[in-house]
Image: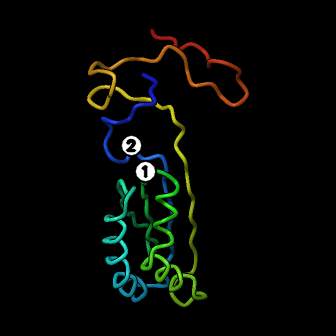
Amino acid sequence: MRTTDFSKAPPQGQATAMFVGATRYRGPLSIITLTLTWFRMVRDMKRMRGYRWHTIYWEFPFTLGTLAFFEDRDALLRFARSRHHRKLMRWVTDGTRNATAGYIRLYNAEPEGYSNGAWRAEGGPMAHIETFTPLSVEEGEGPRVRRK
């Protein structure tokens, strides 16, 4: 079911701004040094208004990444200005002494989306959609969903 009400969704489903990023660190010593600031930064992030949820991921050998969800883009950007985040970014971008690569992407959720089952704000039953979401080259509704 298409909806604009995500009030029953888990925290990451209620967010409208998402951060995706990763950093390739120089080696194990850089990752150990990272933890000194990282735990303080996460503590602050969780206390900030607008924080919804985050997780980290690892890619061999020395890449750590983050997915973080915020209520809106302003909450995400307020976090980016926080003391421990700024300190960490200065350390990461200090030449290639601590890290050798990295990227950041910011995404915004469209107001409408899909929900079903327990996370539906409109009711409990799961439901199918009648038409696909239109592509950028399609006008009006997308094509009808065919069921067998």
Query: Looking at the image, which residue is at 43% across and 54% down?
Result: 70
In percent of width and height, residue 24 lies at 51, 75
**Residue placed furthest toward the top:** 148
Image quarter (top left, top right, bottom left or bottom right) of the C terminus: top left
Image quarter (top left, top right, bottom left or bottom right) of the N terminus: top left
Q: Amino acid at mark 1?
A: Glu
Q: Amino acid at mark 2?
A: Gln
Locate residue 133: give its quadrant.
top right
Which residue position is annotated with label 2?
A: 14
Query: Looking at the image, which residue is at 34% across and 26% down?
Result: 116
In percent of width and height, residue 86 lies at 50, 79
Q: Are marks 2 and 1 in contact (CB under 8 Å)?
A: yes
Q: Secondary structure at mark 2?
A: helix
- Work out whether 4 lies above or below 59: above
Local crowd at mark 1 within 10 Å, few (<14), some, or many (≥20)? many
Observer-nearest of 71 and 54: 71
Q: Is residue 117 left or right of residue 140?
A: left
Query: Looking at the image, which residue is at 42% across and 54% down?
Result: 69
- Work out whether 143 lies above or below 108: above
Which residue position is annotated with label 1?
A: 71
Q: Is residue 56 left or right of residue 129?
A: left
Local crowd at mark 2 within 10 Å, few (<14), some, or many (≥20)? some
Q: Secondary structure at mark 1?
A: loop
Rounded to the nearest whole Å, what is the CA distance between mark 2 and mark 1? 7 Å
